[in-house]
Image: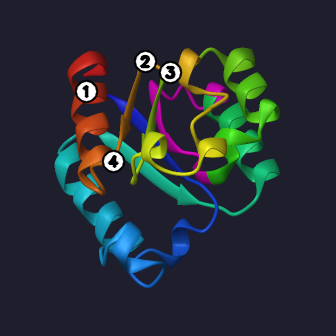
Amino acid sequence: MAKILVIHGPNLNLLGTREQPLYGKTTLKAINQELSRLAKNNSIECIQTNSELEIINTIHDAKKRKIDAIIINPAAFSHTSIAIRDAFLAVQIPFYEVHLTNIFARETYRHNSYLSDLSIGIVCGFGPQGYYAALNAALEKFS
């Protein structure tokens, strides 16, 4: 049985109402419900925070909790947070990076992610399906 942690970063609590042409109408609650369904008998925990500090503390705590893999949508922190990068380097927990939109088709400052070169894989541009693909990959590797 795999232990998977899903971390949703800043502003993702507004999914379903936030910039619908870009992010769609699916809510974070609906994404989490589908992740739980897809996890089947595996352990999955989903958190959302707008705080970089909370993301870092959650990553640190995941090591103590023996989390097998993390799925993270760092949102805007992808492009700004060396501290989140350092947290992943410190704990050495495998992770998958997810973005609802194609970050490479957006503003140039979004083209760089401080996490991508450390991640097992990156899924971007497929909306909520990206989370489900990352979960399937994690379950295949860690179950």
Do callouts 3 and 2 mark residues in contact (Cβ within 8 Å)? yes
User: Is 3 included in the stretch rendered in magenta?
Assistant: no
User: Is 72 included in the stretch rendered in magenta?
Assistant: yes
Q: For the C terminus, which image quadrant?
A: top left
Taking the view exactly as shown, the residue that stands out farthest to the bottom is 17
Badge 3 is on which residue? 119
Q: Is residue 63 left or right of residue 17?
A: right
Do callouts 4 and 2 mark residues in contact (Cβ within 8 Å)? no
Callout 2 secondary element: loop
**For the residues marked 4 and 3, what is the alpha-carbon distance in whole angstroms?**
17 Å
**For the residues marked 1 and 2, what is the alpha-carbon distance in whole angstroms?**
10 Å
Comparing labels 4 and 1, the label whose residue is closer to the camera:
4
Badge 4 is on which residue? 125
Q: Amino acid at mark 2?
A: Ile
Instruction: Tell me the quarter of the picture where residue 80 sits.
Output: top right
- Expressed as whole percent of the image width and height from the top left, the position of residue 116 reads 54, 24
Badge 1 is on which residue? 137
> Tag 4: Cα neighbours inside 10 Å, few (<14), some, or many (≥20)?
some
Do callouts 1 and 3 mark residues in contact (Cβ within 8 Å)? no
Badge 2 is on which residue? 120
